[in-house]
Image (cartoon, rainbow, N blue to C red):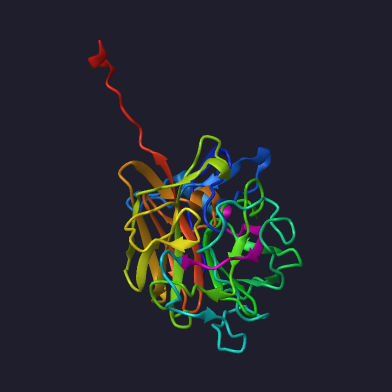
Amino acid sequence: MTTKRTFTTLASISPFAGAALSALVVGCTSANDAHSLQEARPDASEAPDASSADEASSEAGRTIKLTWQVAVSPLLTTDGLEGGASAGAIDAGADSPSDAGFDGPSDAGFDVATGSEEAPSDAGAGDGGYQSLAGVSVCVYQNTAIPCVTTDANGMFTISGLPAVSDIALTFRRDGYVPVLTAIATPNTDIDGLSGAGSPLLMASSVPSMTPVSIDIANKGLVTVVAVIPGSSGRPTDSTGDVGAKISLSPMTGNGPYFLDQTNTAIVPSATSMVYEGAVYFNLDPGDYEITIDDPDHSCSPLSPIVGLYGYPAPPTSVKFPIVAGYSTSAVGFYCTANSVIVNTADAN
């Protein structure tokens, strides 16, 4: 699953870091700790000019590498729900989805539907942060030409040979964990998932048990959606969720959206819009999807052009992502800023 993209470069953008679910927000490496980032796809109605054609040509054949960390996630719950609609412990001996190019441990983690609000930049076992997860096999989905890699004792991995400026997907698998698929819109530079205010990709040993509906992880998929507003510093400690924003999924299958509380660990059953920064959909049929955000008070755009790891941009207000049976698709999301307020000073005179 690889799609080449055409971009124009945004110059001198400082790294944005948001305190979102399991991995917001990851920075891309570049000189002076500033991103050499990409805008989303140009509108189909706009004919490419000569400069964009030259840029696309210059990207052909370029590859990048991704360095990141994988850690263990807590499980999602539901406010006011006792017991559970589904009991999701993973049986290591049960059938698990196969992945082209996978040659390692079966099954790996549930992803970012849960996680603490802030992750330490040096997250790892024994340091008060997340428990790192070794032995996770990381592969490019449906691409056997790029060798899979395995996380080390600290949960770290580096996968090389990724096509630059492309839409790809990575899979994360390990015995005893729900498989994860991450949709990545690669930039034209290497990605360091723990640079700046980065956080690990979180993986859990089961699907959530305390949820409003039973989760069929064997035949369906699920996805987490995030929407964040940067604070004045652009750091995780003062970013917030886009409270009140509404989201819609196309095509609509399965169950959701279910909106998460401020801890990002519990569903608020009565909510019809963002309670804080996260939402989840369960039991989605396999296929390609598009999520759109609606917030009249903020200007929202795909988060992927900022960090590269949160879905395929579909501007102005949508993100695309795949669902594969048996996998949790990790967070896709949006970056929102307050709309400008125009003040009429003439009336004051």
Is residue 74 part of the magenta span, yes or no?
yes
Tell me: residue 227, above or below residue 145. above
Q: Is residue 142 visible?
A: no
Q: Position of residue 256 (x, y in %)?
A: 36, 67
Q: Which residues are magenta?
A: 58-77
Answer whether residue 177 is visible to the viewer in this image: yes
Q: Is residue 273 left or right of residue 217?
A: left
Q: Position of residue 77 (x, y in %)?
A: 48, 67
* Residue at left offset 57%, top offset 89%: 94
Residue reaching furthest left? 347
- In depth, the one of 159 and 262 nearer the eye is 262
Q: Which residue is painted at 47% across and 45% down in the image?
A: 240
Q: Is residue 37 magenta?
A: no
Residue 73 spot, x, y in % from top left: 59, 65
Residue 23's x, y, as percent?
57, 56
Q: In the picture, residue 124 is in which quadrant? A: bottom right
Q: Residue drawn 58% across and 66% down?
A: 74
Q: Residue at x 38, y 64 (%)?
A: 258
For the C terminus, give its image quadrant: top left
Q: Is residue 296 left or right of residue 157?
A: left
